[in-house]
Structure formats: C-alpha cells, structure tokens
Image: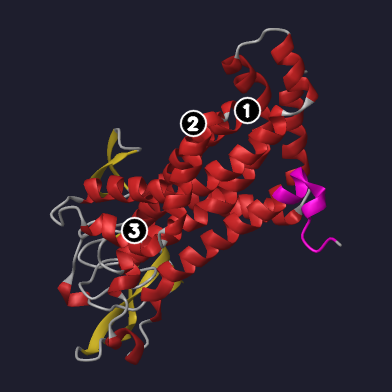
Amino acid sequence: MNPVLRKRSSLWQQLLARPPGVLALGLLGFLYLCALFAPFLAPYGPGDQDLQRTYHPPTGLTWTQEGLAVRLYENADPTQALYRPIPGKTAAIQWFPGGHSYRLFGLLPCRRHLFGVEPPHKVYLLGSDSTGRDVFSRLLYGAQVSLSIGLIGISISLGVGLIAGGLAGYFGGWFDSLVMRTTELLMAIPGLYLLLALRGAFASQFGSGEVYLLIVVILSFLGWSGAARVIRGLALSLRAQTFVEAAIVTGLSPWRILWRHLLPNLASYLLVAAALSIPGYILGEAALSFLGIGIQEPSASWGLMLAQAQEMKVFMCNFWWLLTPGAAVFVTVAAFNLLGDTLRDVIDPHFRTGSR
C-alpha cells in the first residue's frame, strides 16, 4: 500500500477509536447534512412571513387517531404575544407535502418537503420571529451560510498560506523577506478593525450573494498570514532534512520536491489547522451579521438571526426560541475545537491534552 494512503488510513482509524473524535464527527456530519438538505427539511422558506403569528411559541406535538399532530394556538394577548393552546384542536402532520419551490443542491427543481401541515395552519418547531417567520426553517437556511463560509474561507486562506509560506521557506531569499514582511504588516493591524474597514469600504447595496463572497474574501485575507508563517517554519525545517537533500542531489526539480516530499509532510498540520481555524470564520461571519454589515435580509444566517433577537421584548417576554442560533454556533464551534484537539493528539502525541 502507498505510504501516504497507509498513513491516512491509520489516522482515520485512530480518530474513530477516540470517543471525542467520534462525537465531534457525528455532530458536524449531522449539521452539514441538515445544511445540505435545508430546503427539503424546512417546511417554509426563509422569508415566508405571517404577521398574524408573530412571536409564536414552539408548537407542541401530540398523538391522535390520525397520527402525529401539532396543537393549535390562539393569541390571547397580542400585546405580549401570549399564545394558548386551543383544547382539542390539532392539525395532522403531513409527510412529504408540496410547498414552496426550491432547487435541491442548487440544481434539482423540487416542491416536496419532509413535513408540514394543511394551510392555513402552521407548524413552528422552534417558534416564529417578529414577522411570523419560522425559526426552524431560517435556522436550516442559515446553516448553509454559516457552515459553508468556514469551509470555503479556510480552504482559501490555507491555500494561500501554503503557497506563500511553503515557497518562502524552501527558496528563501528576497521572496522569503517579502512574504514575511507582508504577514507581519497584516498581523500588526487589529483584525476586527481591519475587518470592519474592509467591509465598510464596499457599497452597502450589495446583494446577499455578493456580501457572502465579500465576507469569504475578507476573512481569508485576514487569516492566511498566520498560516503562512507556521508553514514557512515547517518548510525550513523539512528543507534541512536528509531525504530532501538526497532528492536535491539526485536532480529532482524544486517543484517535484515540493509536491512529493514537503506537501505530504505538511498535510497533518494543515488538517489540524483547518479543524481549529474554521470556528474563527464561523464566528467572524456571525459577528459581521450581528453588527449589521454581514448577510442581509431576506437571506438568513445565524449571526443575522441573533442580531434580530437582541430586542428588549425578546428578553422581557422570554422568547427563548429566538436564541437558538446562538446554541447552534456554540455546538458547531465546540465540535470543531473538539475535532481539532483530537486530531492534534493523534498526529502528535507530545501535545496531548493533559499530558505532562
């Protein structure tokens, strides 16, 4: 078996042998599957409003002769959004009903959803917001934005850091000096202020798709410098190894040495760095959207949903379901950190958590 494939197989087996790693992989797999199938799982669109059901609490589930059903509610006090269940009134849950049209995976036109109820009734698994939009549906659609930004952003920043740091460490000279001075300049600027300045320098009339790409570019621009410095140090260390010097003596081209010798030895670091860095991108998007300069309506992201939940009425009337995006961010960040710590323990036992 190829040594690289054998190493990857061993790494996967060791990761699955550790309960924290299995737990982290299970949580992240579940979250990303929910994001991938969000239009199918969500009973409503992210912008579907119902002003007659603002701040509706999560609907209770019950079992009837017709099967699983949801309780129906009446608004006893519209000033406080005080909903009370109507005794004996339920609406049966329908499986795979037709609904608003969407494109599954962005390609396949569909109208079927996992569940729903007969209109004009509504099912709110996690309640509704100030305009009667389903929080559960918006949470799923928001996962598409918040989770994908981490993967795309870390791919760009680690890619740029790998190219810049790897070439600087291997070739040295003026290119090394240029890369290091650039990274020092970027790291000397406070990240939050640079983030706000770059976002504020662009037009506020951008659409949601343009804002999404802009946030990815900004976060990647801020994140590649730290990765480049670490990779440069690793490349310098590998450059002095005997197997690299032997490859140089045998006449291999620098690019072949970089591809066949340096990149496989940097793969372990890149894997751990990606797992530990993705939470930063998720939190960065959430912070921008929370401050009102990130994802804009009618799109949804976890940060934007948290920004809309900061009204005093939410806390005074205990509309706790509007804070569920914060719980989603917490679970995602904790899972990525747990996965990164487990990968670090597997790859380098000298840095095991709690080791002495």
Mark 1 touches mark 3? (CB < 8 Å)? no
The secondary structure type at the circle numbered 3 is helix
The secondary structure type at the circle numbered 2 is helix
Crowd rating for badge 2 (residues with CA inside 10 Å; few <14, some 14–19, many 20+): some
Instruction: Tell which of 155 and 117 is nearer to you.
Output: 155
Crowd rating for badge 1 (residues with CA inside 10 Å; few <14, some 14–19, many 20+): some
In the shown orientation, is residue 288 left or right of residue 28? left
The secondary structure type at the circle numbered 1 is helix
Circle on res. 195: 3
> Residue under circle 1?
263
In the image, residue 346 lies in the stretch drawn in magenta: yes
For the N terminus, the quadrant is top right
The amino acid type, in three-letter code, at marker 2 is Phe
The amino acid type, in three-letter code, at marker 3 is Leu
Instruction: Tell which of 209 and 253 is nearer to you.
Output: 253
Residue 355: where, in percent of width, then height? 84, 60
Q: Let me know if residue 295 appears in the view.
A: no
Residue 243: where, in percent of width, then height? 77, 21
| Quarter of the view holding residue 290 | bottom left
In the image, residue 115 lies in the stretch drawn in magenta: no
Magenta span of residues: 344-355
